[in-house]
Image (tube, rainbow, N blue to C red):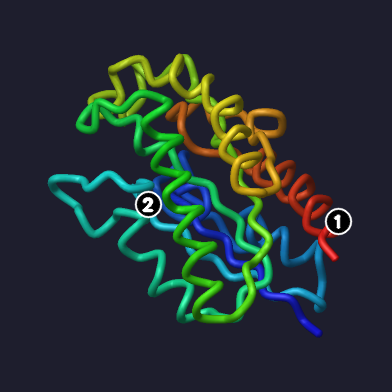
Amino acid sequence: MQKTVLCYGDSNTYGYNPSNGLRYPSDIRWTGRLQMLLGDGYRVIEEGCNGRTSVFEDPVEGWKTGKEYLRPCLNSHKPVDIFILMLGSNDLKDVFHASAQDIANGVAELVKIIQEFTKEKQEKVPEIILISPAEVGEGITNSPFSESFSEDPVGRSREFPKLYRQVAETYGCRFVNAAEYVKASEEDSLHFTPESHIALAEALAEEVRKIK
């Protein structure tokens, strides 16, 4: 039976291309690569949105809050067998003044929603692969996005692996540290290069195959 893999994230799940601001083709995006690697036994669903946060509501684009869309998304794609969650980079924006712990707490809230909602609506809880986002690059001060990320996003992003791992252990999730495979592009210090998309897809394919 084909397994459904739902990938929920921000612009790096959407496949934002830092070179031109457009979208990488499917065969470059880590989600598309993951589908290719896993084959016909899996259906990989892309749910990436530029600017998406975990639980923080942007004063200009409030509809990008990951929490608000999470339940409708789960309901649309049920039954979901595997849920891959990678959010937190946009939570580093100055407008939220959020510590790394605040961000991890927001992600934990999403994990709880996934588990509680799916238990009720599809009678089984999917395996959750929680990904701590890649580190923000040192060149962020010269990035096109520098005005949004001036409150030491680099240092806070380096705290993610430890904190996200704790969330994963608390809620029984699998954990992947994106920083082990991905480096933010030199163009904007936030978004993945094609090489990083490939590396992340390969790591996730290996993790997904462990799930029986």
Q: Which residue is mark 1?
A: 210
Three-letter residue code for mark 2: Asn
Q: Could you tell me residue 145's position as x and y percent?
A: 31, 30
Residue 26 is left or right of residue 89, and the answer is right
Three-letter residue code for mark 1: Lys
Q: Is residue 90 above or below residue 202?
A: above
Q: Is residue 108 above or below residue 104?
A: below
What's the residue at 65%, 51% (across, down)? 129
Quarter placement of the N terminus: bottom right
* Disc 1 + disc 2, Cβ < 8 Å: no
What's the residue at 20%, 31% (across, down)? 95
Q: Nearer the viewer, residue 144 or 204?
A: 204
Q: Could you tell me residue 43's position as x and y percent?
A: 69, 75
Q: Could you tell me residue 34's position as x and y percent?
A: 72, 59
Per the image, label 2 sits on a secondary structure element best described as: loop
Q: Is residue 161 above or below residue 81?
A: above
Q: Nearer the viewer, mark 1 or mark 2?
A: 1
Q: Which residue is mark 2?
A: 50
Q: Quadrant of residue 126?
A: bottom right
What's the residue at 30%, 25% (across, down)? 149
Q: Quadrant of residue 181?
A: top right
Number of marks drawn: 2
